[in-house]
Amino acid sequence: MEKYCPNCHTELISRADVHVCPRHAIGDCTYDAYQLNLNTHAEAPHIEGHRSSETAVN
């Protein structure tokens, strides 16, 4: 199923597992999928059992 930009309705392309608007790169669209993806992951709780390098036991 094809996905479309919510702002300009252009078909989104997949880059690094994120659907981005190709018109954003040239300044024609304000939909920033990368920033939206970062914000979504920042708000999501961390997976239990996953240890970051800060909490790893030496």
Image: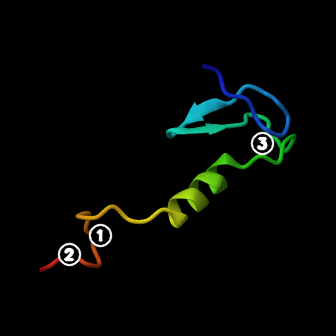
Task: Examine the rendered structure and indicate whether residue 1 appears above or below residue 9.
Answer: above
**Picture quadrant where residue 7 is located:** top right
- Sooner in the amino-acid sequence: mark 3 or mark 2: 3
Q: Mark 3 packing: few (<14 Cα in 10 Å), some, or many (20+)?
A: some
Kindly identify which residue carries mark 2. 56
Q: Position of residue 20 (x, y in %)?
A: 66, 38
Q: Mark 2 packing: few (<14 Cα in 10 Å), some, or many (20+)?
A: few
Work out which residue is located at the far top of the displayed protein and give it.
Answer: 1
Q: CA distance from mark 3 to mark 2?
A: 39 Å
Q: Mark 1 packing: few (<14 Cα in 10 Å), some, or many (20+)?
A: few
Badge 1 vs badge 3, beta-carbon distance below 8 Å: no
Kindly identify which residue carries mark 3. 24
At 65% from the left edge and 54% from the top edge, which residue is drawn? 36
Amino acid carrying label 1: it is Ser
At 66% from the left edge and 47% from the top edge, which residue is drawn? 33
Kindly identify which residue carries mark 1. 52
Q: CA distance from mark 1 to mark 2?
A: 6 Å
Work out which residue is located at the far left of the displayed protein and give it.
Answer: 58
Amino acid carrying label 2: it is Ala
Q: Quadrant of the N terminus?
A: top right
**What element does badge 2 sit on?**
loop
- Sooner in the amino-acid sequence: mark 1 or mark 3: 3
Q: Quadrant of the C terminus?
A: bottom left
Q: Position of residue 50 (x, y in %)?
A: 26, 63
**What element does badge 3 sit on?**
loop
Q: Which of pointers 1 and 3 indicates the residue nearer the eye?
A: 1
